[in-house]
Amino acid sequence: MDYVQFSFHKNAPRVARDGETLSGRKTDSALELASAALQDIHDTQLPAFTAQLREGLESGPDLESLRGCYETMRTLEQDLKDVDTKRTAHTYRLHTKGGDNEEVSEFRKVFVSLSNAATSLDRVRQELKEKKKQIDELAPGWATKMLKHLGTFLGVVVGACLFVSAFQLAIPVAAALALGGAAATLAVVAGAALKCAAAARMSDYDKYQADCAVQLRARADQIDSLRAMVIRAQRDMMIANIRDQLSPEAAEYHAQLLTLREVDQEGNEVPVAPGATTDLGPKVVMIGDGDGSDDRVLLAGIQSGHVWLNETGQAILARRLQAEADFMKNGNGNYREYQKNETLRKSLGELYDCMKFQDGIDTLIFAGDVCHDRLSTNKNVSRTIREDLSSRGVVFLFGNHDDWRSMLDPNGRLCDSATFGTYAKDDATRETWQRHEAAVFANICYIPGVELIGTHQGMRAGPDGTIQTAWGFVTFTGNPTDLVEAIRNKRFLPIPTDACKLQLHHKIQLLLMLSQQGSATVSLRREQILSTLPSCTRTLKRWDDEQKDAMATWLATEEREGRLKPNVWQELLDLHHSGMDQADYQTDFRPTIDENRALAEAYATAGHPVTFFKGHDDSQASGKYLLSLNARVTKKTETKTETETETNIQPTAFAIRWPATGEPVAQPIAKPLDNPWRALPRLHPAKIDKNEAKPDAHPAPGVPGIPQHIDIPSN
């Protein structure tokens, strides 16, 4: 595919030199690919796995997808063997152009084999789920379960009925006694026998189910382990291929998304030795402010394993990433031109046709601002991308640029501002956006085990033992789960509707939740008033009497000197409860790094350490229970006379490795323990309830559809 020229500014792009595309790839050089996952697949995983599958097929396959999986894995094994001679440690050198006698390049051959392997593993994975369901359906029915518990009792009841019925016959009493007694005895014995038979059938099934469950779990663990490794290898190939098509400047701009920075559970960056690999997960991947860039979303989705792109899609994404980097460097902030660019709008749709969404290998969280922002181009396609990712478990935190109301002016009309992506292609109605927000976005994200809590804006201490959030105030209890549940369920501290019922802390809360636009609505000089607040205003502990007196004195002074008018409280209440100021407040609410870190440290002091992550405002920061992922990068340059500070926009990302549980998550494929791919045990047809009419989950060899002998190609 030829390079697509994106025109964002007057300066014409440079002309490509010989052997080079405009995006930087050297066409006559091999792609260097560093992938520990690919190395592990070739050296360890595949040889052992294919050997086990071969033995399983010879023993009588009970999965229809097993043969196809075996053949796909053998093809991948051979393709990796063909390029292994060019490997140094875990670094491969793959040509991206086909040679004189080759129809496809080395890169394409390996990438297609990996993709086929992933698809094949997914088929086996799905059939394993169906197999477990089939086995569950073989469980004895309700009649068998009833006989197990009530067989003898039912025999007694039937016997009693027979004994009484004998006296209704026209026979002598002695004969009736003998006949009734014999019938009753036989009924009781039959009931006891049925109970024993039902108990035996239940016992046989329980053992059968337990044996199958162990084997199926071992299979599922192996499939999940190998699938994750294959997806990581695919990820490494896609990232390397995309990076290779970027100019050095663009690669530097997207550096944090191309190579994730790893941090520990306290948010401190983990140093990585040169040449070391940290790609083997699983991890929690956090992406900073999106600025409306769909390309950052997709690149992050590749990193977490949720997005697969064919080679055409990789080339389109590389060009779009190049375009964003070029624009941020040379576009002079003309976001309107960027949003209206028809090439960008169209290419996002073309890119969507080249992708596949799948269950990821890492947890992926976006800090927000992915909808109505500066780098939006085609909101119709981007909305679909987010919905596809959300259905796969990707988390999108609700940022101020993700609120549809942010695009409206004070009169409720669409604003004329590229800051909120109003020039991007968008055919959705208000109702469509509201449904999208409800279906895709979350106000807060909590990852147990990693003990990670994220919101877009962050949080800080509020008045009188509370926490201020972008939606209201909650009580600080020292337990972070209380905070998470309160925000998820919108259990914020109530504020009265009548000004006569306002208490001191209510008035302070109203002032702290007022936006710049809202202060103009009620004719209040917000910044001037807030700048004089006493130092004890924000505290995670309840106000003591001295602090209450200080707050009351401050409030009385503001009212006496006319900065707070007598009727302002009812106006503030009406504005607050109308919701008209909510979107502007979400934008203006900007807790600092120190305020967020102080809150996280307060939870650690209370015995519940958690790490907070946020975007929205302030510079990037990590460590001491905080990750700040704002897209602004502040660089300081020291000169002989002064320190100059320069702020640039750059995509941001961090990754936290899931802590080890101490227990193996899967049986290592390389260990020749009991092979879980041998045929599953079978439940004898006589042990299956006839009245249930259930098919055997895995018929014995010889039944129609299952050949008794399968030819396996030799190595």
Image (cartoon, rainbow, N blue to C red):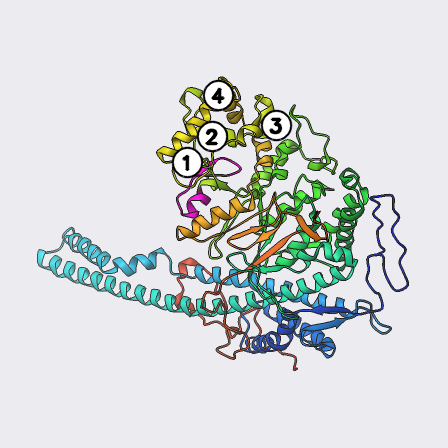
Amino acid carrying mark 4 in the image: Glu
Q: In this figure, which residue is indicated by the disc labeled 3?
A: 517
Q: Eyeballing the image, is 215 above or below 542?
A: below
**Quick one: label 3 or label 2, which is nearer the N terminus?**
2
Image quadrant in which the N terminus is located: bottom right
Q: Is residue 483 magenta?
A: yes
Amino acid carrying mark 1 in the image: Asp
Amino acid carrying mark 3 in the image: Gln
- The answer to whether residue 308 is visible is no
Is label 4 in a helix, a strand or a loop?
helix
Q: In this figure, which residue is indicated by the disc labeled 1?
A: 464
Closer to the eye: label 3 or 2: 2
Answer few, some or many: residues within 10 Å of disc 4's Cα (few below 14, many 20 plus, some between 14 and 19).
few
**Quick one: label 2 or label 1, which is nearer the N terminus?**
1
Closer to the eye: label 4 or 1: 4
| CA separation in Å, label 2 and label 1 | 10 Å
Q: Which mark is residue 559?
A: 4
Q: In this figure, which residue is indicated by the disc labeled 2?
A: 508
| CA separation in Å, label 4 and label 2 | 13 Å
Amino acid carrying mark 2 in the image: Ile
Which residues, given as a range, are shown in magenta? Answer: 464-485
Counting from the top left corner in percent of width and height, residue 518 is at 58, 26
| CA separation in Å, label 4 and label 1 | 21 Å
**Quick one: label 4 or label 3, which is nearer the N terminus?**
3
Closer to the eye: label 1 or 3: 1
| CA separation in Å, label 3 and label 2 | 18 Å
| CA separation in Å, label 1 and label 3 | 26 Å
85 sits left or right of 21 in the view: left
Counting from the top left corner in percent of width and height, residue 137 is at 44, 59
Counting from the top left corner in percent of width and height, residue 614 is at 57, 47
Is label 3 in a helix, a strand or a loop?
helix
